[in-house]
Image (cartoon, rainbow, N blue to C red):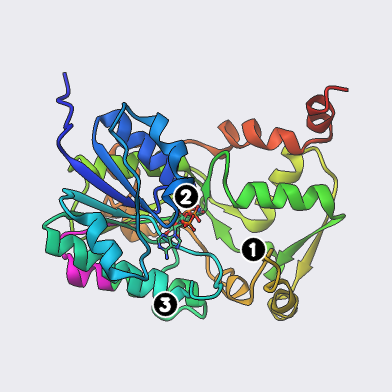
Amino acid sequence: MTEIPTETLVTVFGGSGFLGRHVVRALAREGYRIRPAVRRPDLAFHLQPMGRVGQIHPVQANLRYPASVEAAVHGADVVINLVGILFERGKQRFEAVQAEGAACVARAAAAAGARMIHVSALGADPDSPALYARTKAAGEQAVLAAAPDATIFRPSIVFGPEDDFFNRFAAMARMSPVLPLVGGGETKFQPVFVGDVAQAIAKAVGGAAKGGTVYELGGPEVRSFKELMVYVLSVTERRRLLVPLPFGLAKLQAFFLQFMPTPLLTPDQVELLRADNVVSGAAIDEGRTLAGLGIEPAAMEAIVPSYLWRFRKTGQFRAQGA
Ligand SMILES: NC(=O)c1ccc[n+]([C@@H]2O[C@H](COP(=O)([O-])OP(=O)(O)OC[C@H]3O[C@@H](n4cnc5c(N)ncnc54)[C@H](OP(=O)(O)O)[C@@H]3O)[C@@H](O)[C@H]2O)c1
């Protein structure tokens, strides 16, 4: 029988987010004590029923405030950083959150003698034209500088019931007669199931992943953006026009869209779409993948229809009980 490591305390920054909820659930199953460190603990009460009474205890922390980060890692054995943003708003700048914020967590983890697990993203690159990718790369470098034994995970697009990608485009297909294919829709992705990423992180907490190593996490299939849009339309039973949009034109459109409360597209995201988002050959050769951790990744076909059905015409019909 596996020994339940009840005394191990794991601080999870970003524990209330999409991936965070799955990580907290996976860690709770393993019996760890979990401290989700979130900006609004009052909005994190939904995490507590995932564990036993007293097993999950949210605390307040903001990566832009080092004192709150230090308090959140106090006494922790393992620290996980899942914090990332897709667009900038107010003081939430890429540099402050994804580069300096990651550095702040790693320094605090090292000072507390805790092991560090950091989630970055495929495409992290100091030379990328996208600030998102440059700050993800800067975050990785800062984490390894402060905590050389840290394990870093770079997922491709993550899918699952509350994901931002498939839900967003299914919603767009419901409203709009056309779906844009930025740069012709040729950018390649390797969508990975949120449960598999959470399991990889839980394995790393258990000591199964190498320290000082960057793992690249992708699902079993590589698909172009256009293929993914065709897939969304087939699952949601919609017929929509797929319109190729050259990068320059997409950037112009994104300039205006970026001012929406939750932007559909930003100029930085257009830049991000210039590079493929797939697991590298080097990572596969060196076992720095889900397979290397003994995880067989789930196919999107097995999971995505279970939550995109509500965007179907027939799904709406059923939901209205008509
Ligand atoms: N989802 C994907 O497809 C994908 C792909 C590749 C990499 N990733 C990476 O995976 C990680 C998790 O992504 P996700 O999809 O779960 O994102 P998410 O749902 O947006 O979660 C991000 C979390 O970060 C928190 N956060 C934001 N700014 C913060 C700050 N200044 N201080 C403390 N917490 C802050 C958010 O809390 P609030 O509620 O307070 O804002 C939220 O809990 C991110 O690093 C992301 O870049 C995700």
User: In the visual, does 212 lie left or right of 45?
Assistant: left
Identify the element where label 3 is drawn: helix
Q: Which residue is mark 1?
A: 186
Extreme-top residue of the structure? 1
Q: Residue at x 29, y 45 (%)?
A: 35
Identify the element where label 2 is drawn: loop
Highlighted magenta segment, given as a residue range? 142-152
Report the amino acid beneath label 1.
Glu
Report the amino acid beneath label 2.
Gly
Towards the viewer: 134 or 14 = 14
Q: Is mark 2 within 8 Å of ligand 1?
A: yes
Check residue 282 for magenta coloring.
no
Quadrant of residue 322 within the rendered picture: top right
Q: Residue at x 40, y 75 (%)?
A: 96
Check residue 151 for magenta coloring.
yes
User: In the visual, does 149 lie left or right of 322?
Assistant: left
- Looking at the image, can residue 297 be seen? no
Quadrant of residue 4 within the rendered picture: top left
Query: Mark 1: few, some, or many residues within 10 Å (few <14, many ≥20)?
Result: some
User: In the visual, does 226 lie left or right of 147?
Assistant: right
Q: Which mark is residue 95?
A: 3
Among numbered discs 2 and 3, the one appearing first in the sequence: 2
Q: Which residue is mark 2?
A: 17
Q: Residue at x 79, y 50 (%)?
A: 173
| Residue 88 x/y as whole percent | 54, 73
